Image: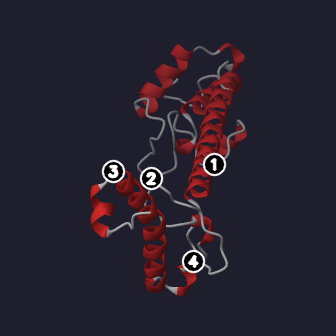
Amino acid sequence: MIPVTVHRLLTEPKHIALLGAVVALVAPAAASAAQNEKLPPRVRLRADAPRVSTVGAIGIGNAKALTGPLLDPVDRFSELIARRTVKAHHHHEVKARKHREAREEREQFETLPGGVTMATLESIASCESGGDPEAVSSDGTYRGKYQFDQGTWESVGGSGDPAAAPEAEQDYRAALLYSESGSSPWPICGQ
């Protein structure tokens, strides 16, 4: 058998392939050992952890052998995908709930009571507040599209600030008031 010299290793194709395989096996382990010493203790490779062969590629050994905050890249990626999926699902549920609540609110106040027409209400609102559902009188007593005072608003089932209520609710409560009392709550604008 002819001894293999460095010159022959570097010039003959069959030896170059063999040398490449040896370097691929040895270099990562040597680089990993050198790097391991530079890492903080919580991230060092465990001495008892099995190594994965990295033939044909330069790698850092077995990622699962790492301790501390580093994870196997596949596990980390899977965890990231799972978190994003849960987050997207939650976002979808919140959005669907908001749409459902808005639809239910519209339906709740869609039909005006007492045969009051929207044209009648629009005429009153235009005169009282310019049709602005958030309007507030200069002294703060009268609020919302129909300029309810707090007692009148509560008498037709409203709660909280009339100017903060949705416009559809203000229309509904004004229609209730109109069906009970006619135009008298709006002595000027109800004519």
Please report whichever mark, 2 or 4, sits nearer to the chain's N-terminal start: 4
Residue 64: x percent and y percent? 62, 66
Please report whichever mark, 1 or 2, sits nearer to the chain's N-terminal start: 1
Residue 148: x percent and y percent? 57, 39
Amino acid type indicated by mark 1: Ala
Amino acid type indicated by mark 3: Pro
Describe the element under mark 1 as helix, strand or loop. helix
Residue bearing mark 1: 82
Left or right of 16, for residue 132: right
Q: Residue at x 63, y 26 (%)?
A: 106
Describe the element under mark 2 as helix, strand or loop. loop
Amino acid type indicated by mark 4: Leu
Amino acid type indicated by mark 2: Asp
Please report whichever mark, 1 or 3, sits nearer to the chain's N-terminal start: 3
Q: Nearer the observer, disc 1 or disc 3?
A: 3
Marks 2/3: CA distance?
97 Å
Q: Nearer the observer, disc 4 or disc 1?
A: 4
Q: Say which of 76 and 25 sits in front.
A: 25
Q: Which of the labelled discs sits on residue 45, or is there none?
A: 4
